[in-house]
Amino acid sequence: MRLSTRGKYGVKAMAELALHYGEGPTSLKLIAERQGLSEHYLEQLIAPLRKAGLVRSLRGAQGGYLLGRQPATITVGEIVRVLEGPIAPSECASEVRQRYHHCGTARGCVTRKVWTKLRDSIASALDSVTLADLCKEAKDVPKGMYYI
Amino acid sequence: MRLSTRGKYGVKAMAELALHYGEGPTSLKLIAERQGLSEHYLEQLIAPLRKAGLVRSLRGAQGGYLLGRQPATITVGEIVRVLEGPIAPSECASEVRQRYHHCGTARGCVTRKVWTKLRDSIASALDSVTLADLCKEAKDVPKGMYYI
DNA sequence: CTAATTCCGAGTCTTTCGCTCGGTATTCGG
DNA sequence: CCGAATACCGAGCGAAAGACTCGGAATTAG
C-alpha cells in the first residue's frame, strides 16, 4: 500500500506550481530545488502531466511550467492517476474495467468486494483534496521542520 | 497503490479458513487448491499469520490450520498489516511513527497531510470488514464465475 | 549568439516480488 | 511400529519494477 515516488514527487511539484500560481513560469530546476528532488527525474514525471493538460510549458530561456488550470480545480487524485495509472489495490478492482479477469478461485472471488470498497475509499480521499487545499495548509507549516 | 500478492493471498487464505470455521483443521494444500494459489508460497504467508495469533496450526497427518479467533473478530486490516507491514502510502504518513523523518523540503512538507488522510481512509476501509462479512458475501457469489 | 530551458530516449543499478526447492520435525492411521 | 501426510524452516533465484542518471537535440529570451 505504498505510493511510489512518482505520485509523491508529482504532487509535490504540482503543489509548488500552485504556490506560485499567477507568477509566471517556474523552471524545473527551481521546483526541484525547492522541493528537494532530482531535476532529471522530475523531467520524467512532468512529461505525462503536460500531456494530460495539468501543466503547460514554455520552452527556451526564462521558460518553465505553469498550472494548466486553476489550483482549486486540480485534485490530488487526478495527479496520482496520471503518474501511477488507475487506482487499483488489486487487478480485479481497478477503476479501469478489466475484461475477462479471472480470479482462479473455484468458488468465485470472495475478496473482490473488499478491494472494490478500498479502491473507492482511496479514490474519494484523493479526489477530495485540491491543490488549493494544499496551498492553504502550506501557510501553517513552518519552514525546514522535521516531521516525526 | 497496489496491494502485493502477500496481502491478497493472505486474505483469501483467511477467508477460506473462515468459510470452514468449526469444521476442524484445513491443510495448506486444500487452501491452495480451493483458492488457486501456490502451496509453497502460501507457507511463507501463513507463518507470520500464525506468529500473530491469527491462525493456529496442528502438525502431523490430518493436521492443518484453524482460525485463531472467531471470524467476526478478525478484520481484513489486521491481516494486511501482518503481511505487508503498517499501512503507509508514504513513509512520512506511516501508522508506525517514524522518528526524525525529514522530507527534504525547504518550506516544509506540503503534502504530508494528504497522505495522512489517505492512510486513515485506507485503514478505516480495511478495518471495517471482518472475515464474517466476507463469508456472508461469499454465499451470493456463483461458482467459477468470470469477473469483468 | 549564447545561455537557459524544455524535450527525448536510452541505460543502469538496486530492490522488491513472487515464487521454487530441499530438507527436517511431527503426528495420525493402520 | 511404520509410513504417509502434514507443518515448519531457510536458502536461492529469475523477472520485474523502482528510482534515477546521462547525453544530446530543439527552442527561445535577452
Image: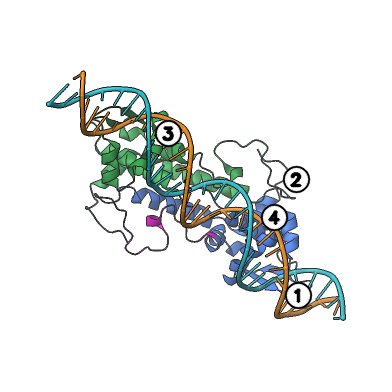
Chain colours: A blue, B green, C cyan, D orange
Q: Nearer the viewer, residue B22 or A65?
A: B22
Question: Callout 3: few (<14), some (14-19), or many (20+) C-alpha neighbours within 10 Å?
Answer: some
Taking the image as shown, residue B89 lies to the left or right of residue A34, namely: left
Counting every numbered tag in the picture gives 4
C-alpha span from label 2 to label 1? 32 Å
Q: Are marks 3 and 2 on the same chain?
A: no
Label ID, residue A60: 1
A97 is within the stretch colored magenta: yes
Residue B132 spot, x, y in % from top left: 30, 38
- What residue type is disc 3 on? Pro
Residue that appears at 58% across and 63% down: A74
* For residue D9, above or below residue D30: above
* Chief SS of the magenta region: loop
Q: Are marks 2 and 1 on the same chain?
A: yes
Question: Callout 1: few (<14), some (14-19), or many (20+) C-alpha neighbours within 10 Å?
Answer: few
- Tag 3 near tag 2, CB within 8 Å: no
Determine the chain carrying the residue at label 1.
A
C-alpha span from label 1 to label 3? 56 Å
Residue that appears at 58% across and 56% down: A7
Determine the chain carrying the residue at label 4.
A
Taking the image as shown, residue A140 lies to the left or right of residue B133, namely: right
Residue A127 spot, x, y in % from top left: 52, 57
Determine the chain carrying the residue at label 3.
B
Q: Nearer the viewer, mark 3 or mark 2?
A: 3
> Badge 3 is on which residue?
B48
- What residue type is disc 4 on? Leu
> Badge 2 is on which residue?
A144
